[in-house]
Structure formats: structure tokens, C-alpha cells
Image (tube, grey):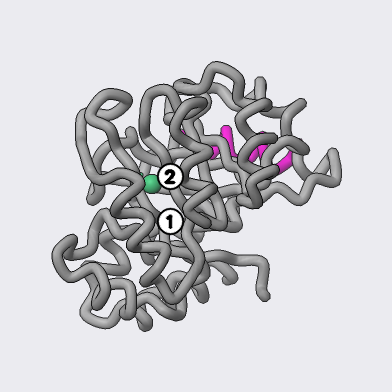
Amino acid sequence: DDGIRINPSILAADFVNMQAELARIATADFVHVDVMDNHFVPNLTFGPQMVERVQATSPVPLDVHLMITDPDRWAPGYAEIGAASVTFHLEAATEPVALARRLRDIGSRAGVAVKPATPVESLFDLLDDFDQILVMTVEPGFGGQSFMPETMPKLRRLAEEARRRGSSVWLQVDGGIGASTIAQAAEAGADTFVAGSAVFGAGDPANAIAGLRAAAAA
Ligand code: DX5
Ligand code: ZN
């Protein structure tokens, strides 16, 4: 374990060949599963029934990213399916700390995500309540967008605060992560990297995963 996690996003996979697509990323740390409800974000993917099949089929554990309204109601169901990690958006949650506690009680890691314009200072006192903080590096909703470098100061502040408090929280980035952007996110303090198009759009996903891992460690 080099302390770096590469989590390919199946948003960029072929949805009708999911079993074969999952087999192509067996060297990843987690598979990133983007749940969108056409309400919190203007796009729609899939829900618990699909995620349950991905859980049954995936060679690696699930990192579920919920881009949905009312996660207080829906997030525990994804932990119950057996997802290793469940991340909900801070902007959508009513009681984020209570929800994180429920996810951990079920046996999942608890994650909280922030959109590019959402400040992170309110999370400083909650670092122990979460296992992962996701700093979105694009507006959530679609794959294939450009990395927003203006989100890096937030990541830097979070990393600094986590260090100061001796926290072991994972810092995740998601959106526009690829060979040319992963190093700046790593340098700013990220240790957990979501990549959709950079992995599934590559001819050889295992090679792409290895390349991202090396670039993040450099
Ligand atoms: C965007 C999703 C991302 C997306 C990333 O809302 O949360 O996980 O799949 O795709 P790329 O890596 O192509 O930007
Ligand atoms: Zn995502």
C-alpha cells in the first residue's frame, strides 16, 4: 500500500457490457460508482438495483458517489448493499454527521463531497466523523470535463488541517483527473483519485491505472 488510491469511474464505461468493463479494472483500488438522480445534478445514471449487481460482479470494492437529493434517506441503502465506501454531498444532506455515523454503523466508510463553489472550512471540525472527503474538481454531473485548478487551494487547506489534527481521512479528487492533472492534485494533498475517461477511454485500462499511480507518487 503506497497510500495512493486510483478509483476508475464506471460513468465512462460501456453500461451494457459492465461485467467485462469491471474485469478491465481489476488492478484498481476501488471502482467509483456515480449515482445521479436528475435532480441534484442534471443527469441520470442508475440506482440501488444496478449498484447491487456491480457489487456482486466487481473484482474491487465499491466507492459510491451519490449525486442525489435527500441522501439522509437513500445513502444507508448503498451501505447495506455492501459498498465499501459511500459518499454523499454536503450541499444535499440535512444531518451529515448523523448520516455518516449510520453509514459506519452499517459497516461502510463514510464520505462527504463538496462542489467546486462550496467552502470546506465547515468540515474542519468534522474530520473525525468522515473517512473520506471528496473535493470535486469539476461541477458534478458529467464525465469528460476539464479539471478546475481553482479548487486546489481548498484541497490544500483541508490537507493542512488534516495534518495539523493528525487525521487519517482520505482526500479524494474527482473530475478531469488524468496524466496531465493528477500530479497537481497529489501535490495539493489528494491521496485518492477518481478517473473516468482517462481509464476507460484508454486502450489498456490497466496500463492507464499504473500510469496514474506512478504520476501521483512522483
Ligand atoms: C462527475 C462524476 C465523475 C466522473 C469523472 O460528476 O462524479 O466521477 O465520472 O469523469 P472524468 O474522469 O472523465 O472527468
Ligand atoms: Zn464521481
Judge by depth and name the residue closer to the eye, 183 or 64: 64
Residue projecting furthest to the left? 16
User: Residue at image x 45%, y 49%?
Assistant: 64
User: Residue at image x 42%, y 79%?
Assistant: 26
Instruction: Report the side of 217 relative to 159 (left or right).
Output: left
Judge by depth and name the residue closer to the eye, 16 or 29: 16
What mark, if any, has residue 97 been given in the picture?
Answer: none
Question: What is the three-letter code of the residue carrying label 1?
Answer: Val
Measuring from the top left, give residue 63's x and y in whole percent: 48, 55
Q: Please tell me whether mark 1 sits on a helix, a strand or a loop.
A: strand
**Screen quadrant of the N terminus:** bottom right
What mark, if any, has residue 65 been given in the picture?
Answer: 2
**Residue holding disc 1:** 194
Question: What is the three-letter code of the residue carrying label 2?
Answer: His
Residue at mark 2: C-beta within 8 A of ligand 2: yes
Q: CA distance from mark 1 to mark 2?
A: 10 Å
User: Residue at image x 20%, y 35%?
Assistant: 43
User: Residue at image x 85%, y 39%?
Assistant: 165
Dot 1 and dot 2 residues touching (CB under 8 Å): yes
Instruction: Report the side of 163 relative to 95 (left or right).
Output: right
**Screen quadrant of the C terminus:** bottom right
Residue projecting furthest to the top? 94
Mark 1 or 2: in front is: 2
Residue at mark 1: C-beta within 8 A of ligand 1: yes
Span shown in magenta: 151-161
- Vertical order, 109 against 207 (above or below): above
